[in-house]
Image: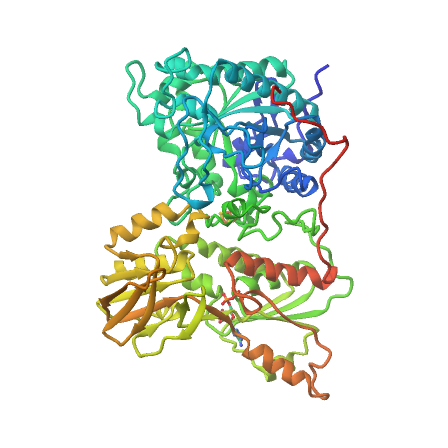
Amino acid sequence: MPREKPGNAVPESSNLDDCHPHHRILFDPIKIGPVVAPNRFYQVPHASGMTEANPRVRAAFRGTKAEGGWGVVSTGAVSIHPSSDDSPLPFARLWNDADIASHALTTEAVHKHGSLAAVELWHGGAVVMNRTSRLPPLSPSGVPWAATHIGFMGQQRPKPMDGSDIEAVLNWQRAATRRALDAGFDIIYVYAGMGYLGYEFLLPEYNWRTDGYGGSLENRTRFVREMLEVTRDEAGGRAAVALRISLEELRAKPSDHYASEAHGVVSLLSDVPDLWDVKMDSSPNDCGASRFRPEGAHEPIIDFVRTVTDRPVVGVGRFTSPDTMVSQIKRGVLDLIGGARASIADPFLPEKIRRGDTDAIRECIGCNMCIASWHDGVPVRCTQNATAGEEWRRNWHPEQFQRVKKPESVLVVGGGPAGLEAALVAARQGYEVTLAEQSSDWGGRVLQESQLPGLREWRRVRDYRVWALSQLGNVAMYTDSPMGVDEISSLEARHIAVATGAQWTTHLYSPLEIPSEPLMGPQVFTPEDVFAGRVAGDRILVFDYDNYYLGGVIAEHLGRQGAQVVYATPAGHASAWTFMTNELPYVYKALGEQGVEILTTTNLDHFNGQLAGLSNLFNQQPLEREIDAVVVVGLRQPNLDLYQALQTAQENTDSPLIDTPITLVGDALAPGAIAHAVHSGHGFARSLIDGDSAYFRDEPINLLEPQPVFVEG
Ligand code: ADP
Ligand code: SF4
């Protein structure tokens, strides 16, 4: 008997009295085949780095989004068979019945709040390397993914699928559908995007077949159609069937019968799925960083879909503004507002719109640290939302805070990301907070860096927190307030957080892959000099072994200001770590546009004010460039002067600070990305009540004895 669908009941939270009338359309229930989404907020499938190894972490992460009002909450990619094995990247699976229980935890957590749970069943085709299962990857015609990034390279080439392979994949999809139903999912996906198996059948570049699955557009669409049909057949009306498809490459292909091949595929499959989930093809485009891709960047590719099908359409665009969301619906682009990053940065975004509290939305900054967590193989982390991934293991709720029984005073020194977050969370817990910043404005490094090309949206880290602090009555905020031991002692705070940040240095780089001696000289600069406008010269060398965004952004910035820029790094790519955040291809475009010369695997040996002596990192082959100024983006060291002075003061038994806990947070504790600083500030404040406990360690759910996973399904 079909389970009663939670979406059919209009949840209590859908009271719209306080919602802006213009935004109420976002709370319309939407029918998706046999189920009804309670509103238009749809958390589309996205990687979380959470697998069957941490089912409670995963359930709490997804459940929190349902609690925050997302009407549909999806999993990330869930492999249907060991021939789709993405290890060492983290992926979920429904390979046999032993995997059902851990997914059931997620569906329960989502249903508890009246939302629908969707599962993105997935076969990776030629993209996966099956490093653990050691099965041959499958693909329509044996065309491999010849990745350029070393982490994705593999030596295993795919097997061209024969008829029995196609039949096997259809059986695996059917078996996974049955398990997904048993786990309680309401929407079941077929995946034909981002280079994975279904997509490979659609694209003639991958699909060289001459049988009924290759050649004409109808033939290339056949595999996806059959995947949808087996899913629908197995679902038997108990769950909706969704198709997730990438349309960028197809839209660029002319067609004899349609406006493009994308129009053709959507027309041919128009009413086969219950829902169209439409997106871009490559990760840097589909999940582009705000530095290069604005909100709503998908629209020119996916805007036609709703004109070709009458089934509901969901799409993304890093939407954080309710007005933009309403516009997408009213202009007939989307029926459901897809959110991945927007839902990570603020799981309560829908709820805040519902209660007319849109200023309180913690907007995603588009930095893609969340994506980097997946590339790192770990559970998701977010710059804006320190609680992402910590809902279960640290019991951090994004909107709810324990209240301190007897309010005590907390002094936070430093108003960068760490200090702002520490102050905000402490205040929300009921402490009497004083926040002091030596400069004339809040934000620390974020204020500085957000002035550089493409980083404007990063200011949201500062703006959200300064606004939120301004709403609280138990916070005193002081700018232009450099704090020393005397000033701090006189405040007699019960707890002190030192969030004084870190400084860039001019240390060079050793072939041992560690910083070496500092480079000295009047024309040697750090990023702080760039922020302050102190760097002068027609020919500037940016030497970068930090290897994240800043060296590249500074090179772009100086190029835009008219300098002739040479960018050198010992790494193999410019801004090498931006591969992790989907920025790398665009970094090269941006540097190319400014005429920046890029020297990789290159070390800086010396600079005499006119000539920079460089050499190849591996063979020491020397090269020289005539240069007026060098900016070193390498090592950051914590600003510890104040902390050390406070510790010294505490040694004096008469000191008023003698029993005061003093805690380093953020970059002053250990320099890192902004996400690390925010997390550190958050953790400091929570520890005031929780103590310094470690987190809970999750464990797999093992209801069954270990079983074989049969190749035939
Ligand atoms: P984080 O990322 O850890 O927040 P930032 O460098 O962004 O670090 O911010 C540190 C902030 O601390 C800066 O805004 C800096 O001006 C401020 N600061 C440093 N020393 C003092 C001090 N002694 N008194 C007040 N503010 C300080
Ligand atoms: Fe947005 Fe950055 Fe958070 Fe990802 S990590 S959700 S891009 S703020």
Q: Quadrant of the N terminus?
A: top right
**Image vertical order of residue 36 relative to residue 497, above or below:** above
Q: Quadrant of the C terminus?
A: top right
Picture quadrant where residue 182 is located: top right
Q: Position of residue 262 (x, y in %)?
A: 37, 22
Q: How is the image coloured?
A: rainbow
Residue 708 relative to residue 525: left or right: right
Can residue 452 be seen from the camera position used here?
Answer: no
Can residue 686 be seen from the camera position used here?
Answer: yes
Q: Position of residue 66 (x, y in %)?
A: 64, 37
Q: Position of residue 99 (x, y in %)?
A: 68, 30
Q: Position of residue 116 (x, y in %)?
A: 63, 29
Picture quadrant where residue 40 is located: top right
Question: Residue placed at 46% from the left, 38% from the top?
Answer: 154
Along the viewing direction, whichever of 349 and 249 lies nearer the viewer: 249
Along the viewing direction, whichever of 463 and 616 lies nearer the viewer: 616
Q: List the single residue furthest toward the top.
A: 212
Residue 530 relative to residue 580: left or right: left
Along the viewing direction, whichever of 416 and 256 lies nearer the viewer: 256
Residue 486 relative to residue 673: left or right: right
**Image vertical order of residue 637 relative to residue 616, above or below:** below
